[in-house]
Image (cartoon, grey):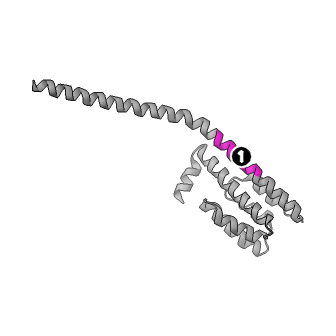
Amino acid sequence: MWIEWLCDRLPMIGSTLRAIDLAEMSESVFVSIASGDDYPSAFRAASRSTRSQMLARWTSRAAERLAAGESLHGIARTMPMRGEFISGVLGAFSGGNTFTTAHALWRETSERMHELMLRRGSQLQLVLAPVLVVVALLAASFAMLLSLSSLYKIVELISGLT
């Protein structure tokens, strides 16, 4: 739990992990809706399939609230992550929608969240690649200095013996 909170606060990494979690959640809901499940069942399936504990708790509570008769629009306002697009989709269901419309909206949500996930992953790679190269060069330089220092001490020891 605290590891998820800490990762969520890291620049670039937190937003990428959130995008991945939201993409997985929307994909799970889409697959459940496409197979004919109702919303409480779809949200229960999403709570079991996500790696994020925060999102799992939210989807589990959302399933209970939906089963109790609360609207998707009301549930969308309690979303813990910054999933504005998903919140907007949930809000769109406050009016009466047909199964075809719901299916299309969840498919679009899933596709958009996966695009966001890929875009954030690419941005993360662009930022982390140079940083990792610099860290690797620093580690190699430090290892080389330690090796040269050890070699110098060995040469001194040998020259002191003769």
The residue under the point 75% across, 52% down is 84
Q: Quadrant of the N terminus?
A: bottom right
**Where in the figure is residue 142, as x and y percent of width and height?**
37, 32
Viewer-proximal residue among 70 and 43: 43
List the single residue furthest toward the bottom: 68
**Where in the figure is residue 15, as x and y percent of width and height?**
64, 47
Identify the residue position indicated by label 1 in the image: 116
The magenta segment is 111-122
In this figure, what is the number of numbered marks?
1
Q: Is residue 146 left or right of residue 36?
A: left
Name the amino acid, label 1.
Leu
Q: Is residue 5 magenta?
A: no
Q: Quadrant of residue 87?
A: bottom right
**Where in the figure is residue 140, as x and y percent of width and height?**
40, 32
Q: Is residue 113 magenta?
A: yes
Q: Main secondary structure of the magenta part?
A: helix
The residue under the point 79% across, 74% down is 69
Q: Quadrant of residue 72?
A: bottom right
Viewer-proximal residue among 80 and 117: 117
Viewer-proximal residue among 131 and 93: 131
Secondary element at tag 1: helix
**Where in the figure is residue 98, as x and y percent of width and height?**
89, 65
Q: Quadrant of residue 88?
A: bottom right
The residue under the point 15% across, 27% down is 158
Q: Quadrant of the C terminus?
A: top left
10 Å neighbourhood of mark 1: few (<14), some, or many (≥20)? some
